[in-house]
């Protein structure tokens, strides 16, 4: 679970918390309706580019390119190639950052999602 830098990340059984630098904390609010309590509330979710960058430490290069292709493809893409590349550069020094930069160079709009990159 990501939390803004300077706050204490949550921890507990099955929860891995980490801080995200202020400059990278771009989020949208997902509005959720709790029908049981007839209430609406907003859940902050990280941007698609930040989520993609967080995958770098756990995926191999081809498996990182595939979701990158998916993010920039379709009638309403969640990101652009021009958004992925700066994100990759901004994370230099983090685990997986070299792989992330290589993946960002391979991401292409319109690539078939059924094939390996």
Image: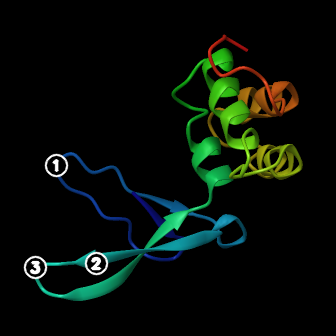
Q: Which residue is mark 1?
A: 13
- Cα separation between marks 1 and 3: 27 Å
Secondary element at tag 3: loop
First of labels 1, 3 by sequence position: 1
First of labels 1, 2 by sequence position: 1
- Cα separation between marks 1 and 2: 27 Å
Residue drawn where x is 77% and y is 27% of the image: 103
Callout 2 touching callout 3 (CB < 8 Å): no
Secondary element at tag 1: loop
Out of 35 and 103, give the one closest to the viewer. 35
Q: In the rendering, at what x and y percent does residue 40 appear? A: 31, 86
Q: In the rendering, at what x and y percent does residue 78 appear? A: 68, 52
Which quadrant holds residue 88?
Answer: top right
Residue drawn where x is 84% and y is 29% of the image: 108
Most distant residue in the front direction:
75
Residue drawn where x is 31% and y is 64% of the image: 10
- Dot in front, 1 or 2: 2
Please indicate, yes or no, whether residue 86 appears anywhere in the rendered image: yes
Instruction: Report whether 5 appears left or right of 91.
Output: left
Instruction: Report whether 19 appears left or right of 77.
Output: left
Q: In the rendering, at what x and y percent does residue 116 appear? A: 67, 11
Residue drawn where x is 50% and y is 62% of the image: 19
Q: Which residue is mark 3?
A: 36
Local crowd size for mark 3, using a 10 Å CA cut-off: few (<14), some (14–19), many (≥20): few
Rendered image: mark on residue 33: 2
Which quadrant holds residue 34?
Answer: bottom left
- The vertical placement of 42 against 46, above or below, is below
């Amino acid at each position: 679970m990501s939390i803004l830098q300077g706050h204490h990340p949550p921890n507990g059984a099955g929860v891995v918390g980490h801080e995200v630098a202020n400059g990278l904390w771009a989020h949208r609010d997902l509005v959720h309706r709790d029908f049981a309590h007839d209430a609406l509330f907003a859940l902050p979710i990280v941007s698609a580019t930040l989520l993609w960058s967080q995958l770098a430490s756990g995926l191999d290069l081809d498996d990182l390119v595939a979701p990158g292709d998916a993010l920039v493809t379709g009638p309403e893409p969640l990101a652009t190639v021009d958004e992925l590349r700066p994100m990759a550069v901004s994370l230099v020094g983090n685990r997986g950052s070299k792989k992330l930069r290589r993946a960002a160079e391979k991401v292409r709009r319109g690539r078939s999602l059924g094939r390996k990159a």
